[in-house]
Amino acid sequence: MRNHRLIPQVNAGSMADIAFLLLIFFLVTATISSDAGINRSLPPDCPTGVDCNSVIKKHNILNILINNEDQIMVKDDIIAIDDLKAIVKGFIDNNGDGSCNYCHGMKATDASDNPMKAVVSLQNGKLTSYKQFITVQDELSKAYYELRNTYSLNVLKKPSDKLTKEALKQVKKAYPFILSEAEIE
């Protein structure tokens, strides 16, 4: 007679249920990181009949450089990030007459002709950190936001978050965000 021993087996019927529950647990408890980005729109194509290759006067361009050591330079001077917003506001908003409300050490002659002609040129080195680039972009956005909000309050007598679409277009036309970005060779 042969001795047959039964080999014990594990009931695998509930394994699928357990795996499914673990999957749901990890999906619910896991955090999905979201990267911060820059909300920018590309400019529209040049309309027919308009010269889009016009020469911009040098004094209407504010050159901002972030070097490879994450230092910020404006007009060949190293500045602190805390000073950037005031400098940008002073360059852009000069009442069209060379006066400068926010100049922060700039001469009125260093300001643009008017907000519609002001161009901010941002250049960065190849080793510039992403964090510093985003910080500078945030300061530029804050400067434009504050200028637009002031215009909205003074001219339209409403805060910028209470504007209609048409009024918002008017504010953006008064203070267009003209930004040129490039990497240093």
Image (tube, rainbow, N blue to C red):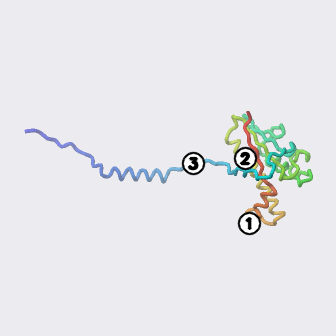
Label disc, if present, on residue 33 of the rendered structure? 3
Q: Is mark 1 on a helix, strand or loop?
A: loop
| Tag in front: 2 or 1 | 1
Q: Residue under circle 2?
A: 137
How far, Cα to Cα, is label 3 from label 1? 34 Å
Instruction: Name the residue type under label 3.
Output: Ser
- Residue 151: name its quadrant: bottom right
How far, Cα to Cα, is label 2 from label 1? 26 Å
Instruction: Name the residue type under label 1.
Output: Thr
Determine the residue positioned at 76% across, 60% down.
169
Q: Residue under circle 1?
A: 164
Apparent side of residue 118 relative to residue 45 in the rendered image (left or right): right
- Residue 123: name its quadrant: top right
Vertical placement of 49 versus 161: above or below? Answer: above
Apparent side of residue 98 relative to residue 149 in the rendered image (left or right): right
Mark 2 or mark 1: name the one nearer the start of the chain: 2
